[in-house]
Image (cartoon, grey):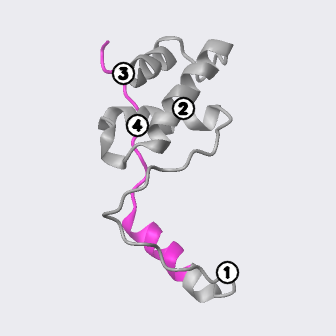
């Protein structure tokens, strides 16, 4: 299902052509992307999703519960220094996703 949705989005140039069928396939793709664990999708589908998401309205879909992960600490929105430290660390250690390339299909 998810591969068919990803293929449809690319084959029909849905970034530039938001037909009802493109929107439907994007929501199918997003539901699987957002609900499934990070490593459940093939890496190329991750790239396609992140290239497409800026062209569509998205829905809020909770991630599947993973008991192997520890709970996040509570966030104190008043602690601006902690926020700055977290943002600085993100920029220092995270990479922007690559953009999809024509894979010849």
Q: Measured from the top left, where is residue 70 in percent x and y?
A: 37, 71
Q: Residues within 10 Å of mark 1 (few under 14, many from 20)?
A: few
- Precedes in sequence: disc 3 or disc 2: 2
> Quadrant location of the N terminus?
top left
Lateral position of residue 75 relative to residue 32, left or right: right
Disc 3 to disc 2: CB gap under 8 Å: no
The circle drawn on residue 54 is none
> Quadrant location of the C terminus?
top left
Distance in Å between CA atoms under marks 3 and 2: 14 Å
Of circles 3 and 4, which is in front? 4
- Determine whether the residue tagged by mark 2 lies in a helix, strand or loop: helix
For the question of whether residue 19 can be seen, the reply is no
- Determine whether the residue tagged by mark 1 lies in a helix, strand or loop: loop
Of circles 1 and 3, which is in front? 1
Of circles 3 and 2, which is in front? 2
Q: Measured from the top left, where is residue 41 in percent x and y?
A: 34, 37
Q: Which residues are magenta?
A: 84-105
**Looking at the image, residue 91 lies above or below residue 61:** below
Distance in Å between CA atoms under marks 2 and 1: 31 Å
Q: Residues within 10 Å of mark 2 (few under 14, many from 20)?
A: many
Distance in Å between CA atoms under marks 1 and 4: 32 Å
- State the residue at coordinates (67%, 81%): 77
> What residue sits right under mark 1 in the picture?
77
The circle drawn on residue 47 is 4
The circle drawn on residue 102 is 3
Of circles 1 and 4, which is in front? 1
Of circles 2 and 1, which is in front? 1
Q: Measured from the top left, where is residue 93 in percent x and y?
A: 37, 67
- State the residue at coordinates (54%, 16%): 13
Is residue 68 magenta-colored? no
Q: Measured from the top left, where is residue 49 in percent x and y?
A: 47, 35
Disc 1 to disc 3: CB gap under 8 Å: no
């Amino acid at each position: 299902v998810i591969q068919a949705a990803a293929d449809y989005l690319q084959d029909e140039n849905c970034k530039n052509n938001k037909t009802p069928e493109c929107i439907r396939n994007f929501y199918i793709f997003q539901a699987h992307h957002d609900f499934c664990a990070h490593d459940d999708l093939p890496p190329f589908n991750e790239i396609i999703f992140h290239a497409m998401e800026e062209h569509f309205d998205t829905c809020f879909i909770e991630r599947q519960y993973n008991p192997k992960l520890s709970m996040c600490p509570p966030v104190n929105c008043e602690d601006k220094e902690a926020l700055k430290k977290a943002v600085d660390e993100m920029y220092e250690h995270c990479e922007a996703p690559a953009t999809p390339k024509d894979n010849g299909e």
